[in-house]
Amino acid sequence: MELIKFKIPKSKFNKLSKEEQVLFVQFGCLHDEIMISQKCFMATIETIKRCSTEVEKSGQTIQLLFFAKLLAEKLHGGWEMMQRCYFGSKLSKKFDKLLNEFTKKDLKEIKTYFNKKKNLISSIRNAFCSHSGTNEAQASVKKIGERAYFYINKKSGNCLFQIGDDLINAEMLSLTGASDLSGAIDKLFDDLSKLTNHFSNFTAECLYQISEKMDIKYKDIEIQNVSKKSELNIPYFIEPD
C-alpha cells in the first residue's frame, strides 16, 4: 500500500492562528478515532460470518453493538467538537469557501442529521454510551424472555453474561423503529456508515486545506502485508497461550 508522508515543521505550524492549530489537532484525532472505531465494527461483522456456533454468534453480536455504541459516541462527539472548533471559532466562514463541492455536501449532510430534534446516533449516545441508564435497565428487565443465558469460563475474559447485554441492546435497537433484530442492525449500520463517511471526508479536507497553508514537504512511502477487509478478525472468545 502506498502512502504519502507529510512532515510538519514547527516553525510553519506556529504561523497558523491558534484556532487553526486547535482545529488541526482535534480534527486529526477525530478522523483517526472514527476510522479506528469503524474498522473494529467492520472487523466484527467479518468475524460473525465465520462463527460456527450460536454462542460465538452471540458473543460477536454483543461485541458488534459495543463497537456501534463506541462509533456513535465518536460521531456525536465530533458534532459537538465542530460546534466549538469549527463554527464557534468562526473558522467555518473561511473554510466553507475552500471546501470542494463533494465535501460541501458531506458538511451539509452532517448538519442536517444532527440538527434534527431526534436522531438515532445522538439518542444512542445519550442513553447507552459510557453507561446504561437506570431507566433503560428498568425497562429492559420487564422484557426478559423464557430463555436467558450466560456463560462461564475459568478465564474471566471468556465469560459472557449474555442476559444483560441482550436486554440492554434490545432497548437500544428499539430506537431504530425496526420490527426485528436484522432490520434494526441494518438501520444502525446505515446511519453509522453514512455519517462515518461524511465525517471522514469533511475532516480530511479541512486538514488538507490547513496543510496547504503550511506548504509542507512530503514523500511517498510503502507499507507491506496490509490486511484485506475479508481477513479482518476480532473474536470474542480467545484461547489463552
Image (cartoon, rainbow, N blue to C red):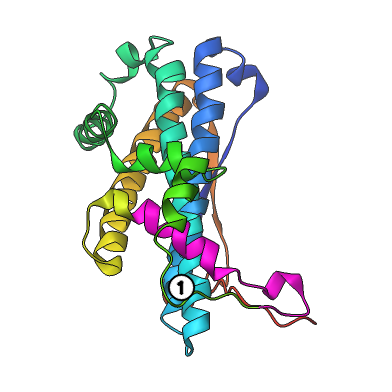
Kindly identify the residue that appears in the image at 27 percent across and 51 percent down: 176
Q: On the image, which quarter does residue 108 sit in?
A: top left
* Above or below for 213 versus 48: above
Q: Position of residue 151 (x, y in %)?
A: 62, 78
Q: Residue at x 52, y 46 (%)?
A: 132
Crowd band around label 1 with a 10 angstrom C-alpha radius: few (<14), some (14–19), many (20+): few
Residue in front for this viewpoint, 147 or 129 = 147
Amino acid carrying label 1: it is: Lys
Residue nearest the observer in this picture, 56 or 222 = 56
Secondary element at tag 1? loop
Residue 35 on image: x %, y % = 47, 50
Q: Where does the magenta region start and end? A: 152-173
Q: Is residue 151 above or below residue 40?
A: below
In the displayed structure, does residue 73 sit left or right of residue 114? right
Q: Is residue 2 visible?
A: no
Could you tell me residue 155's position as x and y percent? 77, 76
Is residue 168 or residue 143 the one in the foreground?
143
Q: Which residue is mark 1?
A: 228
| Residue located farthest toward the bottom when viewing the structure as drawn | 52
Q: Is residue 163 magenta?
A: yes
Residue 141 appears at what percent x and percent y?
Answer: 47, 57
Which residue is nearer to you in this view: 69 or 207?
A: 69
The kind of secondary structure the magenta stretch mainly shows is helix
For residue 215, say whether it is visible.
Answer: yes
Q: What residue is drawn where x is 23% and y is 29%?
A: 116
- Dividing the image into 4 quarters, which one contains the C terminus? bottom right
Determine which quarter of the picture holds residue 46.
bottom left
For the point 28% across and 69% down, which residue is it?
182
